[in-house]
Amino acid sequence: MAVSEEEKLTETSARFWKWGRQNPKDEPEGASTDYLVSLPRRVVTVYIPMVIFLFVLLFPFYWMAITTFKSNEELYNYTDYSPFWVAHPTFANIHKLFFETSYPVWLWNTMLVSVVATFISLFCAVCAAYAIERLRFQGSRLVGMGIFLAYLVPPSILFIPLAVIVFQYGLFDSPLALILTYPTFLIPFCTWLLMGYFRSIPYELEECALIDGASRLQILVKILLPLAVPGLISAGIFAFTLSWNEFIYALTFISSSENKTVPVGVITELVEGDVYHWGSLMAGALMGSLPVAILYSFFVEHYVASMTGAVKE
Amino acid sequence: MAVDVQQPSARAAAHAPSRISRIGQSKGFLSFWFMLPAAALLLLFLAYPLALGVWLGFTDARIGQAGTFIGLENYEWLMEDPVFWLAVFNTFLYTVVASIIKFGLGLWLALLLNHHLPFKALLRAIVLLPWIVPTVLSAIAFWWIYDAQFSIISWSLVKLGLIDHYIDFLGDPANARASVIAANIWRGIPFVAITLLAGLQTIPQSLYEAALIDGASPWQRFRYVTFPMLTPIIAVVMTFSVLFTFTDFQLIYVLTRGGPLNATHLMATLSFQRAIPGGYLGEGAAIAVSMIPFLLGAILFSYFGLQRRRWQQGGGD
């Protein structure tokens, strides 16, 4: 019984890895009544609105990319050049960004802070989710509720007292300030996500191991975690993106240029007085967006699946 | 299953009848160590700051100067501050208008994505982009799109002959409000759409088939099958959406910094401005704290939304 359960589970997790390779007929989703609607009607009710949505959702990115590769004379000249296209693409803006500003340092800082904060949060979240979901200690439901509420506390009401604390601990203007404060919104989120994931793994597997004399730590590391890899990946991606996106803490706790993250650096240092270098600003925005966009493009099916799981839960 | 056996004695104990009680006894101890890392970080950097923030709201703390207790003076001062009330008004306007439009468009997009479309996976990836790209960076793109002299929107509308002069998107109070709301909607639609799509896919197809056999029109199928089945998820998604919109900071900070004439100041941006560049930590904290009652309201709403979902799916945990 337990073995077949396990096989079923491995099969489920294996399916997660075959994103995009599934047979479309296997997918239960989609309105099954589609075939009743004639093609012209579908064009009007489905395809045209979809195209308009896509255009609006994508346009700012297109504009970002186009501006990045425009030379200054083209950028401000709408009479001789069509603004919607680049006549003479140039890498000058990107070159300026990487060799005349501290942008590479900001990229490195953002990467460092995001990766370290993500790993700390994942570690804490795995332990907490296991304790709440599997050890079921007294008051675990209450703690679970508390974790959910903690996720709902927004950074914009915490940054003032946190700034005071960060200053008192002597962490002001150091990456450590961000590494230690980001988990406050990452841990609740990851724990919540992993709790749902752990719940989907049959408890019988653990019982078998317990009877065989395995310790709780062994069960966690050798049984639960390998089966929860897809859940860990989605929690990791979410956490990484949330850290990469964070702004208000980085703006408040960091003052020197060499410690800034990409969002803060771009907004505070690339704007000199009233002179906006739109080319390099857009290049900065584009280069800062690419890492998360690329990461997501690999895992988007996964993202949707874990979201479905969270909603179904 | 290859699990290392610890010690023979442990194994013997595992077979003893007292096994369950033994685990029961060690549970508290184990749980303590498992919860410790998360609890320590959350208590130190979340619970303590939250309490400290409430305390700061009752003091006259400034940057570089620990405050003394002054009671409700900050709040009394805010009550008479027209800028604070303007920020409260803006926050509600921003939240209500943006949330309603996000919900409408998000639901529409979710219903569109739920059809059989070619390149379904690619479409979802594209739709998610505005949500995953850092807000500040996409806000910079909007900043450039809204530029007074070189706005591509103005240029296109002029070329189409719809307007005769460039729109001052961020310089005029009414336009600035509409512009930041539009940018917020743009960013929020994917979250609503993808989550509702996930909800749509949990609705059993048999319900639609039954409705179809009974001769229900598409509108009736939406009204009497899709919408009731989706209500609990809508409640949860909209609570999150309202919560994040209400406490938004990044978009306003990048696009307008609260200007022109404080027309786009939200409570979060006003709190930042008073506390960090302004130096009045106590006053800033008081503004931040006055957001809490509204947040609690939203959370309670979400809580009952969740309860209803449990109830709808057959009760129990």
Image: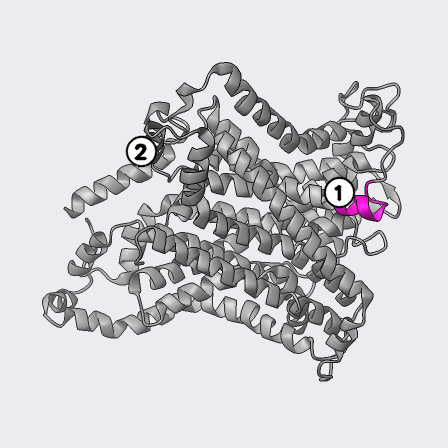
- Mark 2 or 1, which is nearer the eye? 2
Q: Mark 1 = which residue? A: B179
Figure check: B141 above or below B28: above
Residue A131: quadrant of the picture: bottom left
Counting from the top left corner in percent of width and height, residue B175 is at 80, 43
Closer to the chain start, of discs 2 and 1, is 1
Indicate which disc residue A9 carries. Answer: none
Callout 1: 10 Å neighbours few (<14), some, many (20+)?
many
Identify the residue at horizontal 57%, vertical 58% (top origin). Answer: A182
CA separation, marks 2 and 1? Answer: 43 Å
Give amino acid for label 1.
Answer: Ser
Query: Farthest residue in the front direction?
Result: B215
Residue B172 in magenta?
yes
- In the rendered structure, the answer to whether residue B81 lies left or right of residue A208 reads right
Residue at point 42%, 69% (across, down): B36
The reply to the same-chain question for discs 2 and 1 is: yes
What residue is at 64 percent from the left and 27 percent from the top? A55
Identify the main secondary structure in magenta.
Answer: helix
Residue B155 in the figure: left or right of residue A190: right
Q: Few, some or many C-alpha atoms within 10 Å of disc 2 (few <14, some 14-19, many ≥20)?
A: few
Say whether residue B8 is visible: yes
> Residue A297: x, y in percent?
52, 33
Query: Label 2, on which residue?
Result: B206
* Residue B215 x, y percent position in the rendering: 37, 28
**Residue B137 lies in magenta, yes or no?**
no
Q: Where is residue B119 in the image (x, y as percent from the top left)?
A: 48, 23
State whether residue A131 is above or below residue A108: below
Which chain hosts label 1?
B
User: Exactly how many numbered labels are in the figure?
Assistant: 2
Residue numbers of the magenta segment: B169-179
On screen, A60 above or below B271? above
Three-letter code, disc 2? Ser
